[in-house]
Amino acid sequence: MNGPDAGLDTLLDLDGSILEQEGGYWIKIEARRIPASEHVHHGIRYSLTLHDKYGARVLGYDNAHAVKPPKKFKFAGQRLPYDHRHRTSSDKGVPYAFESAHRLLEDFFAEVDRVIKEAQQ
């Protein structure tokens, strides 16, 4: 990461949090520092998930595993991204460009708002 990340302390403080949302939705946040590595260069292991009232994950941002880039791009020989998001309950994940913990929180909560709003229409 380049320079201090204003959202890092916030993200780490939210580790273990369950946040209730409208319509029976809820958010689970896990975040901790780990040694930086080839796959997790920023040194943060995270999982931010939105669940419906039945407990099913409907949205998630995490870096627990690598995801394959879209087939239309040629990534032969490049490392597979670990930072990714799951846009639906069945989505295996699409790459997410991690910039900072602050941006991660902004992006995740904007998606949470969108998903809940769409479900209520």
Image (cartoon, grey):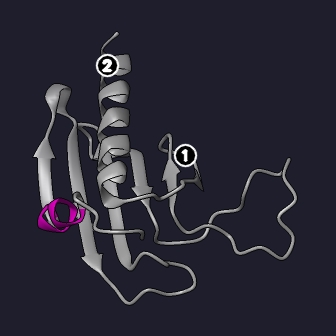
* Residue for point 47% across, 59% down: 98
Residue 39: give x, y in percent of width and height: 55, 79
Q: What element carries label 1?
A: loop
| Magenta segment includes 13 | yes
- Which amino acid type corresponds to the residue marked 1 in the rendered image? Ser
| Magenta segment includes 64 | no
Could you say which quadrant of the image residue 76 lies in?
bottom right
The quadrant of the rendering that contains the C terminus is top left
Residues drawn in magenta: 8-14
60 vs 12, nearest the viewer: 12
The residue that label 2 is drawn on is 117
The quadrant of the rendering that contains the N terminus is bottom left
Label tally: 2
Q: Is mark 2 on a helix, strand or loop?
A: helix
Q: Distance between the residues labelled 2 and 1?
A: 20 Å
Could you say which quadrant of the image residue 16 lies in?
bottom left
* Residue for point 54% across, 55% down: 97
Q: In terms of sequence position, does the residue under pointer 2 or pointer 1 come before the other? A: 1
- Mark 1 neighbour class, 10 Å CA radius: few under 14, some 14 to 19, many 20 or more: few
- Which amino acid type corresponds to the residue marked 2 in the rendered image? Lys
55 vs 93, nearest the viewer: 93
Q: In this view, does 92 lie to the left or right of 19?
A: right
The residue that label 1 is drawn on is 90
